[in-house]
Amino acid sequence: MTVTDQADNCFSKKEILSILSTVKDPEIPVISIQDLGILQNVDVSGQTVRVDIIPTYSGCPAMHTIKTDIKQALGQHGVVDMEVRLLDQPIWTTDMISPKGRAAMQAYGIAPPLSINEKKISCPQCDSTHTTCISEFGSTACKALYRCESCLEPFDYFKCHA
């Protein structure tokens, strides 16, 4: 990434990560690509920045938008020489979602994927575990549609992918 105002004004990896923390997943706009686990690596070499990302699943339609959003965010901060690479390794899993990302999903009304110790999907509205799967296919391919039998609200559940 090249800084347009001064040739010697290079960004640090920490500064680039701070900029990228503002890039949200287009399907879940309350969670950053970092907290979702899509952002895999940032390499800063002089004025050149390389950002490596992985899809949540093969053929994820949001990846084009995410690449564009990354370039736009970096460009708004003066980065010119950048490369955003879409990698096929490692394979993304829901274990890559940070605790902050899981909390953001819950607050947004999406039940985050179950952790190892959880047995039942909790309603993001009332926290009841008395829930029923309505459809294995929700608003996007990575979500299933559930209904809470306590508060009767429908909600998306972010499917486990290990």
Image (cartoon, grey):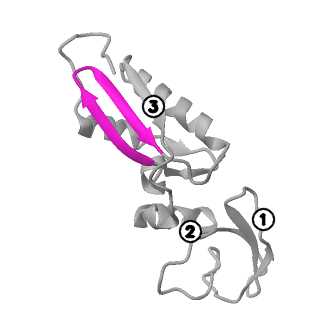
x, y percentage for residue 112?
57, 69
Quadrant in the rendering for residue 3: top left
Residue 137 tag number: 1
x, y percentage for residue 74?
41, 27
Q: Is residue 116 magenta?
A: no
13 above or below 49?
Answer: below
Instruction: Name the residue that disc number 2 marks.
Output: 106
Q: Is residue 154 or residue 34 the one in the foreground? A: 34
**Residue span colored magenta:** 39-53
Q: Mainly helix, strand or loop, the magenta region?
A: strand
Please identify the residue farthest to the left as the structure is shown.
Answer: 8
- Horizontal arrangement in the rendering, residue 98 relative to residue 135 (left or right): left
Give neighbour class at mark 1: few <14, some 14-19, many 20+ (Cα, 10 Å).
some
Q: Residue drawn 62% across and 74% down?
A: 124
Q: Amino acid at mark 2?
A: Gln
Tally of numbered tags: 3
Asked if the residues shown at circle 2 and circle 3 are in contact, with their CB atoms under 8 angstroms apart, the answer is no
- Image quadrant for the N terminus? top left
Element type at mark 1: loop
Element type at mark 2: helix
Q: Amino acid at mark 1?
A: Phe
Quadrant in the rendering for residue 12: top left
Q: Earlier in the sequence, mark 1 or mark 2?
A: 2
Q: CA distance from mark 3 to mark 1?
A: 30 Å
Q: Is residue 43 magenta?
A: yes
Instruction: Name the residue that disc number 3 marks.
Output: 84
Q: Residue drawn 57% across and 88% down?
A: 119
Give neighbour class at mark 2: few <14, some 14-19, many 20+ (Cα, 10 Å).
some
117 above or below 44?
Answer: below
Q: Amino acid at mark 3?
A: Val
